[in-house]
Image (spheres, grey):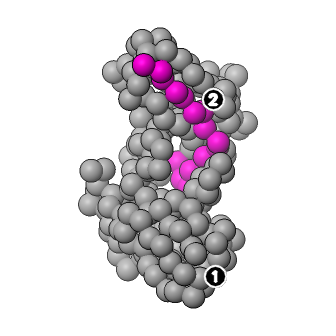
Amino acid sequence: SQQGEEDPQALSIQEGENATMNCSYKTSINNLQWYRQNSGRGLVHLILIRSNEREKHSGRLRVTLDTSKKSSSLLITASRAADTASYFCATGNTPLVFGKGTRLSVIA
Amino acid sequence: ETGVTQTPRHLVMGMTNKKSLKCEQHLGHNAMYWYKQSAKKPLELMFVYNFKEQTENNSVPSRFSPECPNSSHLFLHLHTLQPEDSALYLCASSQAQGDTFVGYTFGSGTRLTVV
């Protein structure tokens, strides 16, 4: 698997606002995943989008995939303080390689 | 509870000690992984096991020794560690490749401090 690169490195927003994070990768993929990590804890799988899908929703999460641009975005709507965490993307199956992530801070 | 259990949650050990980290998954997955996460660094893949067989050793020093006695259990044996080995050690599991792959399930990690 290849490493995805998340952007921005850090993001700070007010509670209730939307948060958008981006992921870029370099070679063709069959799927892309997003994970969340709360400080000092393990990663939690949020959503997997396959290469033949363009958009996927899960609750307040919306993920898009543009294979022509080799990029994906994760949108969290109506953010909450509990969404404060680091977010990572990863491509392919196994073994997964993770980037540095986006550190999201949601201020109450 | 994610279905992947890591013990202990915290461990402090001296450089001459020998200790083991344990990971157990109850998800029926056939692949298990060890990752290391140091402060301000990306997760580093250490070892990969598929169907109990080690398929990847990511240039990990020999003071880290993995063991996978069955597809549900994974150990990381530690001996003569260095202070720079202090980190969060994460275990993960997954189903095999292909259409059945839906992502990794991680444990909560073991916070290791080497003194």
Q: Nearer the viewer, residue A4 or B82?
A: B82
- Residue at 47% in and 11% down: A17
- Residue A78, magenta (yes or no): no
Q: Nearer the viewer, residue B79 or A49?
A: B79
Q: Disc 2 designates what residue?
A: A10
- Residue at 47% in and 50% down: A40
- Callout 1 amino acid: Ser
The magenta stretch is A93-108
Taking B6 as reference, is A69 above or below it?
above
Q: Main secondary structure of the magenta part?
A: loop
- Quadrant (top left/top right/bottom left/bottom right) for the C terminus of chain B: bottom right
Residue A62 in view here: no
Which of discs 2 and 1 lies nearer the camera? The answer is: 2
Q: Nearer the viewer, residue B114 or B45?
A: B114
Identify the residue at the far right of this view: A26
Which class describes the residues within 10 Å of circle 2: few (<14), some (14-19), or many (20+)?
A: some
- Callout 2 amino acid: Ala
> Secondary structure under badge 2?
strand
Q: Nearer the viewer, residue A83 or B58?
A: A83
- Residue at 73% in and 36% down: A26
Q: Disc 1 designates what residue?
A: B62
> Secondary structure under badge 1?
loop
